[in-house]
């Protein structure tokens, strides 16, 4: 092989098996890697590792993508959970270039509003914000100044400050009760008082790219399933094994090997929460990361219910915290109907009969007859994302612990707010550490 590098081999245009044979000869080490979880971190890690290792992915569900998975309707695809990206997501853009999907990325305007006492208040343009009756002019100025300062604030010290305390101290009680408290309640429920100001300021900063027509957000024309499908296709072509519908039931160390579901591997990368790794492996030293579940209903219907607004937050008490009108963001013509998400979060488990409760409330609240609903689906994810409590920074696990590799929503790039960008970085960084450990 001489001075041939891995990059050289990658571009030989050889099939996955033969290419890996050349790599094995060159490196004198063929590493058998098991990746638990076929979400974005797992797929990204597999892509990084697949040129130098034999990779097997175990995914408990019958499809890949995790929270990025999609429904395949008759004429289109639509995500289980609403998704968009931001102008700062450079690693995502790099992945799209690598997958040949850059031309599908488009930038659209995302409008926002608030539902208060049954009335919809648009809050996109400066004029609309000034007209909002539930905050004083002084309140609006304070809120605007915080938005302008958010990107420059040091998040480190804010990790131990409760968001509730920060809002009350810097913005006042009225802004908290009239604006932030309903948002925190819908997002974190009974744990809202534990959430850190680091999360809050990060959230404000990332959502501050606004113009008079709304927030500039990215979406993939055709749907984010294009990313998942293309990654799967390339991984299979590169010799990876992908086993869907295979939940992980055990992780065990035996000599120099790890047994996952009784099968031997050199290395294991887990993208599931650390407490789940502890449960499956019996290694009790993994610190539990606080998580919450998400129940997201997707509805296809024949009308717009949010007065043209993309993201409508609910101040009124409802079994969902936001109504996300996808077709007020992405052109309706692509789907032939309106599409709405109802976003809900829960602690240990969702409320009984949640789908019926959400749909009934939605139809009543927005005067939608049953005949207007074309279809509806409820996606439930028990580990939808971390709850960024005070002191969360101390809970973030390293990429390697007790001989196992870890990467996912709980990893450093996803603090203090999870994103597709953070999950991609986490998968890549964990994979590189595996390669360094095994190949030097």
Image (tube, rainbow, N blue to C red):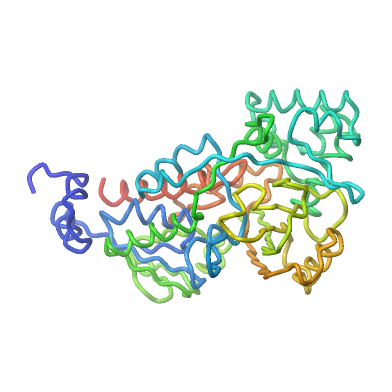
Q: Is residue 23 left or right of residue 297?
A: left
Asked if residue 347 shows in the view, the reply is: yes
Residue at the image point whose x is 78% and y is 58% from the top: 320
Between residues 420 and 128, which one lies in front from this camera angle? 128
Residue 147: x percent and y percent? 71, 28
Between residues 167 and 311, which one lies in front from this camera angle? 311
Asked if residue 256 shows in the view, the reply is: no
Residue at the image point whose x is 67% and y is 38% from the top: 203
Q: Is residue 185 above or below residue 233?
A: above
Q: Is residue 331 left or right of residue 46?
A: right
Q: Is residue 119 left or right of residue 325?
A: right
Residue at the image point whose x is 84% and y is 39% from the top: 179
- Image quadrant occupied by the C terminus: top left
Between residues 192 and 435, which one lies in front from this camera angle? 192
Location of residue 200 by image quarter: top right
Q: Is residue 380 above or below residue 427?
A: below
Residue 39: x percent and y percent? 49, 59
Number of marks in the rendered image: 0
Residue 41: x percent and y percent? 47, 53
Residue 188: x percent and y percent? 75, 52
Location of residue 227 by image quarter: bottom left
């Amino acid at each position: 092989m001489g001075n041939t590098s891995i990059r050289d081999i990658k571009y030989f245009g050889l099939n996955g098996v033969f290419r890996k044979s050349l790599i094995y000869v060159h490196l004198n080490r063929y590493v058998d890697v098991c990746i638990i979880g076929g979400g974005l971190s797992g797929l990204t890690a597999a892509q990084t590792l697949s040129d130098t290792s034999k990779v097997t992915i175990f995914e408990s569900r019958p499809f890949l993508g995790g929270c990025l998975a999609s429904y395949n309707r008759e004429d289109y695809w639509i995500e289980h959970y609403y998704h968009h990206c931001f102008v700062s997501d450079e690693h995502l853009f790099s992945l799209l270039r690598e997958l040949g999907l850059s031309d599908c990325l488009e930038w659209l305007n995302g409008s926002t509003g608030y539902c208060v006492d049954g009335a919809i208040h648009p809050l996109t343009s400066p004029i609309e914000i000034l007209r909002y009756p539930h905050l004083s002019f002084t309140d609006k100025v304070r809120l605007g100044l915080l938005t302008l300062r958010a990107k420059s604030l040091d998040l480190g010290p804010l990790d131990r400050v409760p968001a509730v305390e920060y809002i009350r101290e810097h913005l006042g009680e009225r802004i908290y009760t009239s604006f932030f408290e309903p948002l925190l309640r819908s997002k974190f429920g009974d744990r809202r008082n534990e959430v850190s100001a680091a999360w809050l300021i990060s959230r404000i900063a990332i959502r501050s790219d606004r113009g008079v027509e709304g927030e500039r957000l990215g979406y993939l024309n055709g749907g984010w399933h294009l990313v998942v499908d293309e990654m799967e296709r390339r991984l299979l072509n590169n010799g990876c094994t992908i086993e869907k519908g295979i939940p992980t039931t055990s992780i065990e160390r035996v000599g120099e090997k790890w047994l996952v579901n009784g099968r031997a591997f050199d290395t294991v990368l887990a993208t599931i929460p650390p407490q789940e790794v502890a449960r499956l492996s019996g290694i009790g030293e993994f610190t539990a990361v606080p998580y919450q579940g998400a129940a997201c209903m997707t509805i296809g219907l024949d009308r717009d219910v949010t007065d043209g607004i993309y993201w409508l937050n609910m101040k009124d008490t409802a079994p969902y915290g936001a109504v996300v009108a996808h077709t007020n963001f992405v052109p309706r013509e692509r789907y032939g109907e309106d599409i709405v998400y109802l976003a809900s979060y829960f602690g240990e488990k969702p409320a009984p009969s949640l789908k019926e409760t959400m749909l009934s409330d939605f139809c009543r609240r927005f005067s939608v007859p049953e005949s207007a609903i074309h279809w509806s689906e409820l996606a439930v994810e028990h580990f939808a994302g971390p709850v960024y409590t005070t002191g969360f920074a101390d809970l973030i696990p390293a990429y390697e612990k007790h001989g196992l590799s870890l990467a996912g929503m709980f990893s450093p790039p996803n603090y203090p707010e999870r994103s597709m960008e953070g999950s991609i970085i986490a998968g890549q960084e964990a994979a590189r550490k595996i390669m360094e450990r095994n190949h030097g």
